[in-house]
């Protein structure tokens, strides 16, 4: 389950980067300003992503927060940065907390 969750989280980031219809602006999270990237997915879900001034993804909200992913405690793994903790929430209640201790990149 954790492996599929990681793949889904990475896929969300790729969609944010690749989506030509994404809108960018500013949003507030935890009292701080963030870059807010939002779009409607091909299956009709509204997706909002909050990105900090260092380019790290902090939160992804789907359909106004009915599903939410929080990314925190970024760490360096070899040549890239990855969140040390990912929390998924449904209707505001955490249903999965993933603690990342090591990341191995494979290509292919």
Image (cartoon, grey):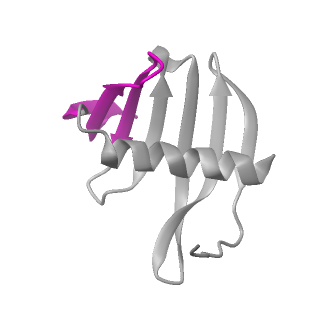
Say whether residue 78 is visible: yes
User: Of residues 1 and 43, which is closer to you in this image?
Assistant: 43
Q: Quadrant of residue 34?
A: top left
Q: Which residues are magenta?
A: 23-50
Q: Quadrant of residue 35?
A: top left
Q: Residue at x 65, y 35 (%)?
A: 88
Q: Kindly give the residue lying farthest to the left in the view shown.
A: 25
Q: Is residue 3 left or right of residue 24?
A: right
Residue 41: x and y in percent read 41, 25
Say whether residue 51 is visible: no
Q: Is residue 19 left or right of residue 64?
A: left
Q: Residue at x 62, y 20 (%)?
A: 92
Q: Is residue 38 magenta?
A: yes
Q: Main secondary structure of the magenta part?
A: strand
Residue 16: x and y in percent read 36, 42
As drawn, 92 above or below 12:
above
Q: Kindly give the residue lying farthest to the bottom in the view shown.
A: 78
């Amino acid at each position: 389950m954790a492996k599929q969750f990681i793949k889904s989280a990475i896929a969300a980031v790729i969609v944010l980067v690749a989506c030509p219809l994404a809108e960018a602006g500013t949003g507030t999270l935890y009292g701080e300003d963030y870059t807010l990237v939002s779009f409607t997915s091909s299956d009709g879900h509204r997706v909002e992503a909050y990105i900090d001034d260092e380019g790290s993804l902090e939160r992804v909200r789907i359909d106004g927060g009915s599903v939410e992913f929080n990314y925190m405690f970024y760490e360096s793994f070899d040549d890239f940065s990855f969140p040390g903790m990912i929390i998924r929430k449904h209707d505001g209640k955490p249903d999965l907390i993933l603690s990342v201790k090591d990341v191995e990149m494979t290509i292919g």
